[in-house]
Amino acid sequence: MAGSAQAGGQVAQPNINVLASQGVQGAGLGTVAGMQYQPQTLAQTNLAPYQDPYTQQVIEAQQADVLRGAQMGLQNLAGQAQQAKALVDQDMVLQSQN
């Protein structure tokens, strides 16, 4: 590209940064126009055919593991509560004897 003429017959050189920016912007606009991308179209797409058929099985197995761990934790907590109650009851018996 040639520069633009200025007063006094001097030619101003084009700014390479401005030209590069214009090129990138033009390429981006061309890409968007070529793709005809519409976000709402993707949101309404059923993705199930593209998913791994074993995904649901993996999810259910993980949920079962989490539930099993929670149940074990609750059983531990119940056992600790029973031990604590037994200790409190034993202390009460000892205090009443004194």
Image (spheres, helix red, strand yellow):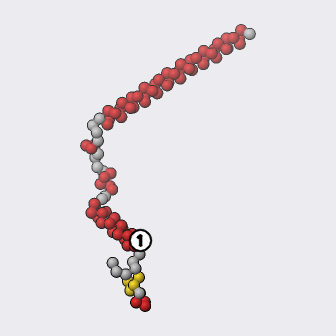
Q: Which residue is mark 1?
A: 17
At 34% from the left and 64% from the top, the residue drawn is: 28
Which residue is at 39% across, 69% downward? 21
Residue 57's x, y, as percent? 32, 32
Q: Residue at x 30, y 59 (%)?
A: 37
Q: Residue 98 at x, y = what percent?
A: 74, 10
Farthest residue, direction right:
98
Residue 52 point in image, percent of width and height: 28, 39
- Which quarter of the picture shows residue 2? bottom left
The answer to which of 26 and 52 lies nearer the viewer is 26
Q: In which quadrant of the rendered view does residue 12 lie?
A: bottom left
* Callout 1: SS: helix
The amino acid beneath tag 1 is Asn
Please tell me in which quadrant of the rendered image residue 89 appears.
Answer: top right
Where is residue 33 drawn, in percent x and y?
29, 64
In the current view of this chain or complex, which residue is farthest to the top?
97
Q: Is residue 91 above or below residue 1?
A: above
